[in-house]
Image (tube, helix red, strand yellow):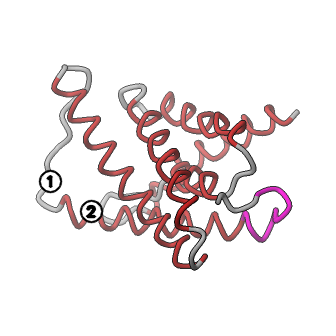
Amino acid sequence: MKIFLVIIISFLAVAAQLTLLPRLAILGVAPNLVLAATIAWAIFRKDQKSDWWVLVPVLWLDILAGRPFGLLTLSVWLVFNLISWLAGFLLRKSEIISLVALSFLGCLSFFVIFYGLTQLASSFGLAAAPAIRSDLWPVTLIGTTYDALAGLATLWLIKKSYPWLLKING
């Protein structure tokens, strides 16, 4: 029953990501609900046995988004592991500052990793080269801020709605 619930919720989150959230775009950057949920799961989790659940919504998004398959999944998985590792160190300090820092760092590292993997795939002819925009850094900053705010909202929602479900990783 639990896996069925994860699959259904993941599908609904991906459907919202692909249909509703592009309407909230600023300078062509829409919030990434799947990334926000992944970062929230990396910070709040009980054990490492449930890490693979993060792949369910990411694989749905990777299949349905129309991008080269695997780049998004690998990027999000690397960010998930980075934030999980960093949460063990940072969350021993001030919790609010650490949550904000982890959210922004997770989103920024996603942009860097995804851009790097797309460049690498395009050099082998597996994907189209990402367009170099003159406003790349402002767009990256807007995307990072947008996704980090969505991640913080997800963290708050999880912490308020299901305090028994998740504990802070650390």
Q: For the point 55% across and 48% down, which residue is it?
A: 34
Q: Residues within 10 Å of mark 1 (few under 14, many from 20)?
A: few
Q: As shown in the figure, which amino acid type bears the numbered disc 1?
A: Arg
Front in this rendered view, residue 44 or 56: 44
Q: Which mark is residue 133?
A: 1
Q: As shown in the figure, which amino acid type bears the numbered disc 2?
A: Val
Rendered location of residue 114, percent (x, y): 33, 42
User: Would residue 66 be found to the left or right of residue 10 on screen?
Assistant: left
Rendered location of residue 85, percent (x, y): 52, 51
Can you say which quadrant of the picture contains the C terminus?
bottom right
Query: In the image, is residue 51 part of the stretch drawn in magenta?
Result: no
- Earlier along the polypeptide chain: callout 2 or callout 1? 1
Q: Residues within 10 Å of mark 2 (few under 14, many from 20)?
A: some
Q: For the point 66% across and 58% down, which residue is it?
A: 169
Q: Which mark is residue 139?
A: 2
Write the start and end of the magenta stretch as one range. Answer: 158-166
Q: Residue furthest top?
A: 125
**Vertical placement of residue 81 versus 4, above or below:** below
Q: For the point 59% across and 49% down, which residue is it?
A: 16
**Vertical placement of residue 24 versus 116, above or below:** below
**Vertical placement of residue 32 versus 122, above or below:** below
User: Would residue 100 be found to the left or right of residue 166 on screen?
Assistant: left
| Quadrant of residue 75 within the rendered picture | top left
User: Would residue 115 be found to the left or right of residue 63 on screen?
Assistant: left
Rendered location of residue 166, percent (x, y): 77, 57
| Quadrant of residue 7 within the rendered picture | top right
The CA span between labels 2 and 1 is: 9 Å
Badge 2 element: helix
Q: Are marks 2 and 1 in contact (CB under 8 Å)?
A: yes
Front in this rendered view, residue 21 or 162: 162
